[in-house]
Structure formats: C-alpha cells, structure tokens
Image: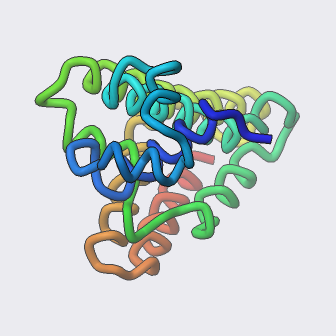
Amino acid sequence: MKTTRDKLINATFDEVFSHGYQGASLSDILAKAGVHKGSMYHFFANKKEMALASIEETILQRNAEKYRYVETYTNGFLEEFYTRLRDTSVRDFKRGCPIANIVQEMSNIDEDFNTLMKSIYGAFRANIKAILDKAIEVNEMKTCDTTKLALFITSTIEGAILAAKASGNAQDYVDVIEELIEHIEGKR
C-alpha cells in the first residue's frame, strides 16, 4: 500500500515530467495524489522541495533497477545492456527523457536543480561505465577508456530519445541505438 508520501512523490514526478517544473501545478499534484495541502506540508516545505525529492528518488530508483543486473551477472553484460537499450517499452517518446527535460529547463536558473541533475547524470554515466568495466573484466570487449565511452553512450542515448520525441517516431530511437550498438561491437 502506498503511503501519502509515496503518492505525493509519484504525482509530483508525473506532473513535472509532463509539464516541466515551472508548469507543474501544485493543485493538480495534490489532486492526483488525493491529498490535501496540509498533508504535503507534513513531508515537504514547498513544491520545490517535493519536486527535488520526487526527481531524485524516481530517477535514481529507475536507473538502479535498470542496471542492477551488473551486480548479479557473471557474463553477458553487453548482450543484456543491448536488450535493455532496445526495449522501447520503457521509454516515453512523447515526453522525452526526464533527465534531459529537467536539465534543459532548470539547471541554468536554479542551483539546487543544477546540483541534483549533475548528480543524477553522473550516476547514469557511472552505471554505464560499470557495465563496460565488467564486460572488459570478463573479456567481452577489449580494454578501452570506459569513462569516455560511457560519456559517448549516455550522450547518444539522450540524443536518441530527443530525436524520437522531436520527430514523433520511435524508429528514430531504434535506428540510433542500433548504430550505437554497432559502435560498441567494434570494441569487442
């Protein structure tokens, strides 16, 4: 059963993802969560604090779940990574990438958002680097600069999501991802 705080976190993330932080309506968040303003103030001082918590908790949790397999696998790291990259069902091409959307909207106007998004993006890159490091460790790919390759991969994924959002065509994402995989395969 979801707690009141969970309902607020989920509703806030959905509203911010759909409308941006500045366009997110506190009354819509509260209505979606099914709670009153007083309940919000029990957990959060204001909309900004609630938005920051919802972004951090939701995105970090999703990324951790998406890449947690690295901790349990002993081989097949790249194949599993490719499977996850190819899975368009976990992407929202209408709204785009929540990381990129928030970075573009808020990072240059609010230091708290800027700091949080740098942290989230850094964790995303670290997750990708861990996959690459494990693949090298078990001889699935040749030794390379995994820090630079992780930057290239995360940038390409973000660009692929943006391309699909801009065109309204998920195939744009698929095409970019297949080119990315071909690039990574060249390092085997």
Visible residue check, residue 98: yes
Give the quadrant of residue 21: top left
Image height check: is 100 above or below 170?
above
Is 19 or 173 nearer to us in this picture? Answer: 19
Q: Quadrant of the N terminus?
A: top right
Give the quadrant of residue 77: top right
Point 52% across, 29% down: residue: 39
Residue 3 picture location, percent across and down: 70, 34
Image height check: is 147 above or below 181?
above
Point 47% across, 52% down: residue: 31
Q: Left or right: 105 with respect to 3?
A: left
Residue lying at the far left in this picture: please name it. 109
Residue 78 picture location, percent across and down: 69, 48
Point 38% across, 18% down: residue: 45
Residue 71 picture location, percent across and down: 79, 28
The colour scheme used to paint the residues is: rainbow
